Image (cartoon, rainbow, N blue to C red):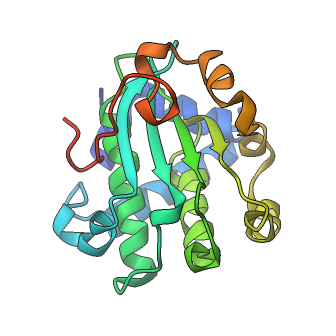
Amino acid sequence: MADDSPEEVDDLTIRRFLRARGLDIGKASSMLLRYLKWRREFVPNGSISLLETPNEVAQNKMFLQGSDKNGRPITVILGARHFQSKGGLEEFKRFVVYGFDKICSRMPPGQEKFVVIGDLKGWGYANSDIHGYLGGLTILQEYYPERLAKVFLVHVPYIFMAAWKIVHPFIDKNTRKKIVFVDNKKLKSTLLEEIDESQIPDIYGGVLPLIPIHESK
């Protein structure tokens, strides 16, 4: 599977950017050129090292294991473990890129998308990071177009909706369609619609233990 570095702009990458801009060649070309410029500047070494994200990695909040019924890799994010770190917004954005690149590297040939389980159990105002959320959203929508298959938001507390109302207007229409708020009583049954039980994390009634993304192979 080719990565998303400037040296590896293959046909699949070009098609993703085209789909993201409704097959408008001009808009897709502009988007791709912005991506290439960003990639050269933000990831000059071709990849993000764990040494560049020590504070984010220490929070142990992102995991990678298993795949859905379509072979799309699954990442689990524990929102209550996220805090604004002393590394600031730039380190957080580097961690986001590290995570996306790691997920993309796990995709089987021909697969382009991944699935997210965003677990907000225990999330409180101390975890709220609007600048971080918007920074990660921008990276996803502008530089990893057509990579996201679906987001399952689980264990969503009522107080999270205050942050959601701020972030929601910045989510494009295509991304909004991929976000599912899961009823706690239907959590496992909802996941089973798209993920085999053998691939569901054990904390949701499956069998796979959570593997921190920096430890996944």
For the residue pair 67 and 189, the one nearer the viewer reads as: 189
Q: Position of residue 144 (x, y in %)?
A: 51, 46
Q: Position of residue 201 (x, y in %)?
A: 43, 30
Quadrant where the image shows the N terminus: top left
In the image, residue 14 above or below residue 213: above
Quadrant where the image shows the C terminus: top left
Q: Quadrant of residue 136?
A: bottom right
Q: Is residue 135 visible?
A: yes
Extreme residue in the bottom direction: 86
The structure residue drawn at horizontal position 55% and vertical position 29%, both measured from the top left corner, is 15
In the image, residue 209 above or below residue 94: above
As drawn, is 165 to the left or to the right of 110?
Answer: right
Q: Position of residue 36 (x, y in %)?
A: 42, 55
As drawn, is 124 to the left or to the right of 200?
Answer: right
As drawn, is 125 to the left or to the right of 48?
Answer: right
In the image, residue 93 above or below residue 176: below
